[in-house]
Image: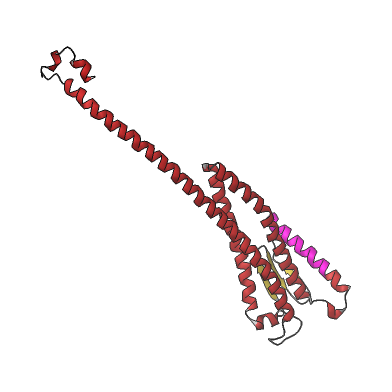
Amino acid sequence: KAKIYILDLAALKLICRLDRVDILYSADSGSNRRNVVDQFVEDLRQSLVEANNQADNASLALELQVLEAALAVLVTKNFRQLALLTPVLDELITDTIAYPTEIKVGRLAALKKSIYAYNKGVIKMAGAIRELLSSNRDMADMYLGERRSEDDHEEVEFLLEAYLSDLNEIELESTGMVASIDDTMELIGLHLNSRRNSIIKLSLIMETLAVATGSCAVVGSIFGMNLLSGLENHPNAFFYVT
């Protein structure tokens, strides 16, 4: 009824009206968010220029162009992050398996925490889109310029489903990264358990030898207590005891 919609997805927050877009953005925001906002503005400007060169019935309404530009920027950003994380993760896993030091295991755990937080953000975005897709009325209301029936929302539905598919792919890849880290940590745990068992085995052998040596020392201690048994005067007693 207010002829607006509010979009709040990760680093991009905006209010779309019939004739303009208000970006909720502060000057002290991080560089990552500034890059997302700048890219969104540039993509939206390019989309509007292309729309002006087309026939009126061939271009999307402003509100749908805003939605498409926002989703495209966020999906592209997440795919780029995955492309940067993949080689780093592969190299770290290889080094950790080859040299399972405390520092490398700590780095692997920190990377897992980072990917897990990133994955949660992707899941939230996908959940927001699924929630919108579940309501025909909400999708029809995405057309701000006219009141449409609940069944008249094909453009919005196709647009949301396309980008939801991309987000699902990103979610699967990031989940696979977390699973790879878990497998690596489990492998390292098995390796350390094997080393621990070897140390326990060596310790058991040493203790067995100590008991055996101590048993022999008992004989020497008996003869070293200055107890008269008659054997201490035997000429070969020392040799036999030794």
Residue placed most toward the observer, 207 or 82: 207
Above or below 213: residue 154: below
Picture residue at 61% right of the left edge, 59% below the top: 174
Magenta stretch: dominant secondary structure: helix
Decide if residue 108 is on the left or right side of residue 11: left
Magenta-span inclusion, residue 26:
yes
Picture residue at 57% right of the left edge, 55% below the top: 180
Quarter of the image for residue 230 reads top left
Decide if residue 240 is on the left or right side of residue 26: left
Q: Position of residue 121 (x, y in %)?
A: 61, 63
Q: Residue furthest top?
A: 235
Above or below 117: residue 129: below
Residue placed most toward the observer, 34 or 94: 94
On-image quarter of the C terminus = top left
What is the span of residues highlighted in magenta in the rendered image? 25-47
Q: How many marks?
A: 0
Task: Look at the image and tell me whether residue 55 can be seen.
Answer: yes
On-image quarter of the N terminus = bottom right
Q: Position of residue 130 (x, y in %)?
A: 63, 74
Q: Residue furthest bottom?
A: 149
Task: Look at the image and tell me whether residue 143 can be seen.
Answer: no
Magenta-span inclusion, residue 37:
yes
Residue placed most toward the observer, 223 or 64: 223
Q: Position of residue 15 (x, y in %)?
A: 71, 71
Picture residue at 50% right of the left edge, 52% below the top: 186
Quarter of the image for residue 65 reads bottom right
Above or below 98: residue 69: below
Q: Position of residue 82 (x, y in %)?
A: 66, 57
